[in-house]
């Protein structure tokens, strides 16, 4: 019986890990679209896109990301007892039944401040203002729509990664989801940006995001808002 239970735990954990990697694959759609298809169509690299090409890039990417995430979440619901869409609908922003303790709020605030300060340093000031100056009033909303979808995918990797490793190690105190994001999202930024620093910076941020998810007692709504603040602002 013990071997059977261990085998079931391994299989369930592997299934959730695959979901997390599938979400990472969904993120990778942008590489195919932005670095292969669009340069072929426009005969120019992504850094030379005009305004409308950038808008189309973001709209197509967000649409593909949203569809891909929905398919993975529905597959998860079908093959496991995890209904993320139902969880989001039913769970309030702040749950009295799963109250966040004072020490958890303190760590959440510290993590948020850490991310905001590091972003301020990295951008030599406000990221939002810098993006607005760079993109202008037309491109800016589409850029931030793109960020909102990106944060959603990162949170899904955290959720699936956390469940996978908890199944394997029977430990719910370590931010396994954040570690998975650090390895996947961080590696992705390293490759796409061509900078080890960018990958490391993203990896550290991913670990903090995973920790925030645990500190909110796995409240998906609150975690999403916190991740948006940490990453977008």
Image (cartoon, helix red, strand yellow):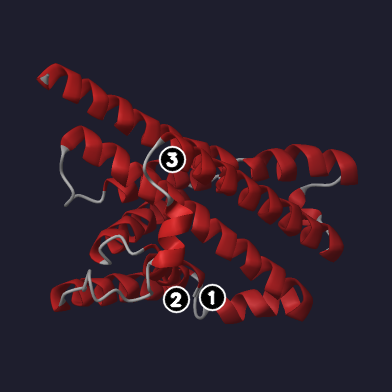
Earlier-in-chain disc, 3 versus 1: 3
In the image as oriented, which residue stretches furthest toward the left? 2
- Where residue 164 sits, quadrant-wise, is top left
Is 210 placed above or below 131 here?
Answer: above
Compared to 124, does 209 lie above or below?
above
Classed neighbour count for the residue bearing mark 2: other residues with Cα under 10 Å, few (<14), some (14–19), many (≥20): some
Element carrying mark 3: helix
> Which residue shows up at 37% across the image and 50% down it?
159
Q: Label 1 belongs to which residue?
A: 127
Pointer 2 or 1: first along the chain: 2
Query: Distance from label 3 to label 2 (Cα)?
Result: 30 Å
Q: Which residue is mark 3?
A: 20
Q: Residue at x 63, y 62 (%)?
A: 146
Question: Toward which corner of the image does residue 139 lie, by quadrant?
Answer: bottom right
Residue that badge 2 annotates: 120
Q: Name above or below for residue 85 compared with residue 81.
A: below
Tag 1: Cα neighbours inside 10 Å, few (<14), some, or many (≥20)?
A: some
């Amino acid at each position: 019986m013990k071997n059977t239970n261990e085998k079931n735990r391994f299989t369930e954990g592997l299934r959730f890990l695959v979901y997390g990697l599938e979400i990472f694959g969904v993120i990778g759609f942008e590489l195919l679209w932005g670095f292969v298809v669009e340069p072929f169509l426009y005969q120019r690299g992504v850094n030379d896109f005009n305004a409308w090409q950038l808008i189309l890039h973001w709209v197509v990417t967000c649409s593909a990301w949203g569809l891909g995430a929905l398919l993975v979440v529905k597959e998860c619901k079908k093959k496991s007892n995890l209904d993320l869409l139902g969880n989001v609908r039913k769970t309030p922003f702040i749950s009295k039944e799963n109250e966040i303790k004072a020490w958890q709020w303190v760590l959440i605030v510290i993590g948020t401040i850490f991310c905001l300060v590091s972003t301020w340093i990295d951008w030599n000031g406000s990221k939002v203002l810098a993006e607005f100056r760079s993109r202008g009033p037309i491109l800016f909303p589409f850029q931030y729509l793109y960020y909102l979808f990106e944060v959603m995918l990162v949170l899904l990797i955290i959720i699936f990664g956390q469940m996978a490793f908890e199944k394997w190690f029977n430990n719910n105190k370590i931010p396994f989801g954040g570690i998975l994001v650090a390895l996947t999202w961080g590696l992705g930024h390293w490759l796409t940006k061509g900078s080890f620093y960018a990958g490391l910076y993203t990896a550290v941020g991913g670990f903090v995001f995973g920790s925030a998810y645990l500190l909110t007692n796995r409240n998906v709504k609150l975690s999403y808002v916190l991740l948006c603040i940490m990453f977008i602002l």
